[in-house]
Image (spheres, rainbow, N blue to C red):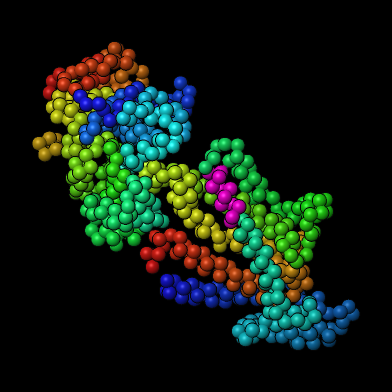
Amino acid sequence: MTEPLLSIRDLTVRVGRADTAPAILDGVSLDVAPGETLGLVGESGSGKSTLGTAVLRLLPPLLDAGTTGRIVWRGRDLLGLPRRAMRRIRGGEVSMILQDPMSSLNPVQTIGAQLREALRRGGRGDLHAAAVAALVEVNIPSPAERLRGYPHQMSGGMRQRVVSAIGLAQDPHLLICDEPTTALDATIQYQFLELLKTLRASHGMAMLFITHDFGVVSRICDRVAVMYAGRIVETGPVREIFARPRHPYTRALLASVPSTDHAPDRLPVIEGQPPTVGNRPAGCPFHPRCAHATDRCRTVPPETVVGPSHLVRCWHPQETPL
Amino acid sequence: MARLLASRLIEAVAALLLMSVLIFFLSRIIGDPVALLLADGATEGDRQRLIAELGLDRPLLQQYLTFIGNALQGDFGRSVAAGNRDAFEMVMSRVPASLGLAGVALAFTLAVGIVLGVIAAVTRGTPFDVLMRLIALLGQSIPSFWLGIILIYLFSVHLGWLPTSGFGGWQYYVLPALTLGLFTLAAVTRLVRASMLDALASDYVKLARIKGLAEATVVLRHALSNSLIPVVTFMGTFFATMITSAVVVETVFAWPGIGRLAYESILSRDFPVIQVVVLVITAFFILANLVVDLLYLAIDPRMRSRG
């Protein structure tokens, strides 16, 4: 395997510095290789957005202070980096697009001003030409006119494309996508995913794709990591996970995805609620909701290799196909 | 743009007319000017003659129509207390002093309040932030008549740095502007702090940071530009507060503005002057709100496209 671009080891994010403070992320480790797209799947509150934001060191001060572990970016641990050096990594090396296109653009500045601001840091010569080119790249019609306009004059899908143009303005090596399609209509979602694929290819960048939607994962990701209650419970290549999910939680998630050949009258649901931060059970966090749980699940399960690049954290990995 | 101005103008005229009705009838309720005007030992005959002379014996509606008719020709009557002077001229001669004081106070308030609010938001939770909030709380709680007297005692009587009262060079502005502005300063500080905190937690500020911009650029260019919108919204209210506080502050500092004139003419039941004072203040309000609307158009592009 090539040297990973991003290598996260034992990342824990607590609400404050104290060891006893509740943990939003609890010992997460993952790698992203150059050019690879890793999907990060989980329910709301599982900590996936916190993980994405932590990589850029943009968590609120309280959470940033409570961050331990290592986030190694091309050989450098970002957690030990001075502010100024971290700022040079943002935008230029690692960039991010956010979930809600309606709120991620500044309402009182023109599209052009917000785009040029990013391009200027990327050191482009003719900023206006570069801005027009950036909008053309994300398929925005009459770009010169749009540059003079404001965010409120655009639709959600168009704004999200502007946000991606801003995210890509400095040609990053890694783009963190924090549920970028969740707020979009289904047809626009599809278009936007196709656009992201094109951009990924033309920029040759890696992506960390945060979503709760396995359908999106199957479209765009190479590998997937499933998160539950601040931990990664299973990780592996997308095909492998879809074909042979081993963790009961992954299986339950996949079973609740409707598709054309899998459309029961009632979709199966996972009984109970995910635990809130601070009320997470000891051992495997999923055991109170798991049909296969035994007493052993009250202790933390080890990470087991169950297939090629397929890891699962479970005492009772399931064998039968879904 | 033109449509907005036209509709505001019509509203302004309607508001002024309504105000004139209100003030005309209210001032007839609160007291009898004739009793004040008559010298001691005046006979019932003198009284009747004065009433007839002032037109107070005619029906109220007729009195009002006469008042409006004259007002439209610039004649608001003559002061009954201050030697028969023209009421309109009396009030207008006081306007520059009041506007000067309110202008200085408003400029001081906005400049200092925005700076303090931004610093408090950026240093949230630190001792500085706590201190700012305490000062803001005090500023909104201290009554201006008390503050004025304390400032005079401290800076004029005790230290001798500034004049106690009266009208003149810049030294004369310091204490009254401070007294007049403190309440609004506290309000602006709290408002800017709150809206800055909202803006700093917003997605567009997060995106600005993702771009790798310097923190100063993020705060000033992205967060502050959005945080000023609520400040503009409250500008009309701030101006209103200043005009109403001016009655007290101008009286404490013997400032020759319309606030003190209002106070004096109310004491002497000088109806014609009271009427003009209130109408002029109403006109100021309407003008201030119009300025707020225009400022809105200037700073918020969402308002511009609403048409």
Q: Quadrant of the C terminus of chain A?
A: top left
Residue farthest left in this picture: A261
Q: Nearer the viewer, residue A165 or A123?
A: A123
Relative to residue B294, is residue B135 drawn left or right? right
Question: Taking the image as drawn, is residue A286 in sight?
Answer: yes
Residue farthest top in this picture: A296
Q: Nearer the viewer, residue B79 or A2?
A: A2
Tell me if residue B17 comes above or below residue B217 in the rendering: below
Relative to residue B131, is residue B83 drawn left or right? right
The span picked out in magenta is: B110-121
Tell me if residue A111 comes above or below residue B99 in the rendering: above
Point out residue A146 in the picture as x, y percentages from the top left corner.
Answer: 30, 59
Q: Residue at x 47, y 54 (%)?
A: B225
Counting labels gives 0
Point out residue A80 in the picture as x, y percentages from the top left corner.
Answer: 42, 28
Judge whether residue B119 is colored magenta. Answer: yes
Q: Residue at x 38, y 30 (%)?
A: A78
Q: Nearer the viewer, residue B247 or A127?
A: A127
Question: Taking the image as drawn, is residue A101 in sight?
Answer: no
Tell me if residue B192 comes above or below residue A219 in the rendering: below
Q: Residue at x 34, y 47 (%)?
A: A123
Q: Quadrant of the N terminus of chain A?
A: top left
Judge whether residue B252 is colored magenta. Answer: no
* Quarter where residue A237 is shown: top left
Relative to residue B276, is residue A88 drawn left or right? left
Residue farthest front in this picture: A125
Q: Residue at x 61, y 44 (%)?
A: B132
Q: Main secondary structure of the magenta part?
A: helix
Point out residue A35 in the picture as x, y percentages from the top left corner.
Answer: 22, 35
Point out residue B1 in the picture as x, y percentages from the top left corner.
Answer: 42, 71
* Quarter where residue B257 is shown: bottom right
